[in-house]
Every structure is written in C-alpha cells, then in structure tokens.
Image (spheres, rainbow, N blue to C red):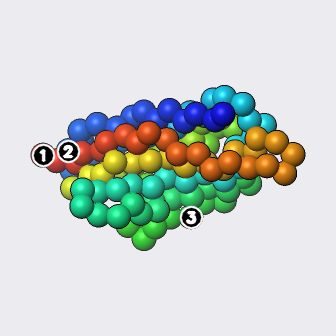
Amino acid sequence: QVQLVESGGGLVQPGGSLRLSCAASGRFFSINNGAWYRQAPGKQRELVATITSDGSTNYADSAKGRFTISRDVAKNTQYLQMNSLKPEDTAVYYCNVLAKVGAGQHRQVWGQGTLVTVSS
C-alpha cells in the first residue's frame, strides 16, 4: 500500500504564502506523476497543478504565476508553494500521485486533504 500524508495548510491573510507538503510512504518503487487538486465549499474538485516524472509542470490558469509545484525525489515528497494567496483560494487541497507498485503496475493515490483558508 501507498500512503500520502499532507501538511502545511492553515489560516493565512490575503497576500500571504503557504507551502503544502505531501509525503509518500509504504510499498512502492517510485512516484511518477504528481498533482495537486482543490475543492472549495459547494464546488467540484479542480486540478491546480501537475508535475511529471521528468519534472515538467503545468498549472491551472488560476494558479499560474502564484503557485509552484515541485518534488524531492529522495524524500518521496511533493510540494505546492502558494504565494499571493486570495480568498478564492480557500479550499481543501489534495495531493495525488501515480506510484509504481510493481512491474508494469501503477496505482493512483490520494492524500487526506489539508484545509487552506485565506481570510483577513
């Protein structure tokens, strides 16, 4: 099994910054692609950012220029640095990874979510 533990959420004022972390543990060979999603109250879950195994990144328009997704392969951890936060960024943020669990076998895993609240 692969487990993801998220941390770093909290309350921040508009314009502030937070860094979310997502650490993978358990039985797997490697973490391939990764992503961060978010779900605001009353809304559907939406994709925020993605990172591939070779480090290529992509962002939702709402995150471009403000958020940065990264990963530390040695620590099996991915991050989401969020700057210039706005009240509309308030949501539960979920990490998602594609883990290689066997020869030709991959498993998509979700974190438990961490709440980010942007408010003055």
**Do labels 1 and 3 touch, CB within 8 Å?**
no
| Residue 61 seen in this snapshot | yes
**Do labels 2 and 1 touch, CB within 8 Å?**
yes
Measure how far apart labels 1 and 3 are at the Cα level: 29 Å
Residue 77 percent across, percent down from the top left: 59, 36
Measure how far apart labels 2 and 3 are at the Cα level: 26 Å
**Local SS, label 3:** strand
Label 3, residues with CA under 10 Å away: few <14, some 14-19, many ≥20 = some
> Tag 2: residue type?
Gln
Residue at screen point 46% across, 35% down: 6
- Residue 40 disc label: none
Q: In this view, which residue lies farthest toward the bottom?
A: 61
32 to 44, vertically: above or below: above
Residue at screen point 61% across, 43% down: 71
Front residue of 8/65: it is 8
Front residue of 63/106: it is 106
Residue 18 percent across, percent down from the top left: 36, 41
> Tag 3: residue type?
Asn
Q: Earlier in the sequence, mark 2 or mark 1?
A: 2
- Residue 13 disc label: 2
**Local SS, label 1:** loop
> Tag 1: residue type?
Ser
Image quarter (top left, top right, bottom left or bottom right) of the N terminus: top right
Residue 84 percent across, percent down from the top left: 31, 53
Q: Earlier in the sequence, mark 2 or mark 3?
A: 2
- Residue 120 disc label: 1
Residue 83 percent across, percent down from the top left: 36, 50
- Residue 58 disc label: 3
